[in-house]
Amino acid sequence: MHTINRKVFLQQLTSLVAAGAYSQHSMAQSAWPNKPIHFVVPFAPGGANDLIARAGAEGAGKALNQAVIIDNKPGAGATVGADFVAKSAPDGYTFLISAAGIISNSMIKKSMPYKDSDLVPVAMIALAPSVIIVPANSPYTSLKDFIAKSKTDKGLNFATAGTGSTPHFVAELLNIKAGANLRVIPYKSGSESLAAVVGGQVDATSEASIVVMPHIKSGKVRALATTWTHRLSQLPDITTAYELGYTDIQIAHWAGLHAPKGTPQAIIQSMANAIDSAMKNPTISERLKNVAIEPIGGTQASFEEFVTQERARLQSVVKITGMTDE
């Protein structure tokens, strides 16, 4: 009898301890966020990633009733900022504004300071589709004409913002999926490659819609197509590569949110909900659309699916081309 009572007592004690631990865990999470949250942007201020981050931070801050601070930590193709977040405490107060480089860096760099698995997808914020552009006086008026011409003679020059940049992937996708013959001309930044197109020094490039829209509207460059699945709200006359039959050419300058591995799921879910709410906020949504950025939002699951598909798509390009930044 004594043995049975002791067993029951131990079971009850174990249950009480577990309940207490769960209660403390729930209280800790329910108190989140009780101080400012930091969004680390791995690029310099002013670019598409930074602008999307600031819109997301504003909206998420309102939804969570807490300040969200932007910290710009540029360097090494987004690796510096990503490494900082990967090694931050997984307490829900430090997030990374992620981009395509967060997926592709480990594919093209010889060594990485962190593992891909050290960062967990939280939510998609928004994206700025790439727009393939040529000089204003270029003889090419359509993407099909441009691709056809590249197949003749020695091909055409395509400027990029450096190895592994989104424009680099656009060029290689055109080569692989559309049979184009484009010579990649790497510049140090998107602004330099854009200037090369404006000046007629190269045949084409691609850049984020938010970057090229003013140049398209002013007549400095001509747009041939965007590289997303639907047309831009602010540039509805520009066709998509998808519409032209190049269904595998899907890539954009996107910005999402990643968290350090180990961040409580309840916090990740709350942040994903806050970002989704922000992208559905008419004021924020219209502000992004007005500068040719498409608000996305969605769930953590939808962002995880996007990241998985993006990884597979970029990995195939890297494998075929042997792309490396070394």
Image (cartoon, rainbow, N blue to C red):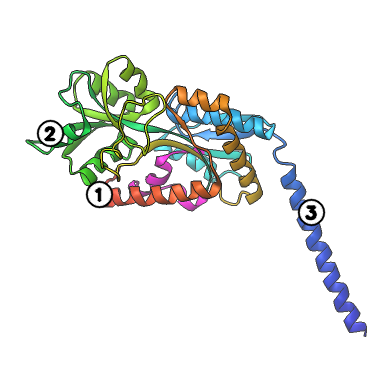
Residue under numbered circle 2: 149
Residue under numbered circle 3: 23
Residue in front for this viewpoint, 211 or 10: 211
Tell me the distance, in whole angstroms, between the alpha carbons under discs 1 and 2. 25 Å
Residue under numbered circle 1: 322
Q: Quadrant of residue 16?
A: bottom right
Task: Tell me if residue 113 is in the magenta stretch.
Answer: yes
First to last magenta residue range: 97-118
Residue in front for this viewpoint, 128 or 259: 128
Tell me the distance, in whole angstroms, between the alpha carbons under discs 1 and 3. 52 Å
Residue in front for this viewpoint, 288 or 325: 288
Q: Report whether 261 appears left or right of 28.
A: left
Q: Quadrant of residue 238?
A: top left
Query: Which numbered disc flags the more N-terminal residue, 2 or 3?
Result: 3
Q: Is residue 110 visible?
A: no
- Residue 77 location, x and y as percent? 39, 37
Q: Report whether 90 appears left or right of 154.
A: right
Image depth: mark 2 or mark 3 in front: 2
Residue farthest along the top direction in this orientation: 218
Residue at left 43%, top 43%? 102
Circle 1 — which element?
A: loop
Task: Tell me if residue 75 is in the magenta stretch.
Answer: no
Residue type (three-letter) at the residue carrying disc 3: Ser
> Where 6 sits versus 56, above or below?
below
Q: Is residue 225 visible?
A: yes
Q: Report whether 231 appears left or right of 270.
A: left
Circle 3 — which element?
A: helix
Q: Are marks 2 and 3 in contact (CB under 8 Å)?
A: no
For disc 1, the neighbor class at 10 Å (few under 14, some 14 to 19, many from 20) is few
- Residue 45 location, x and y as percent? 47, 25
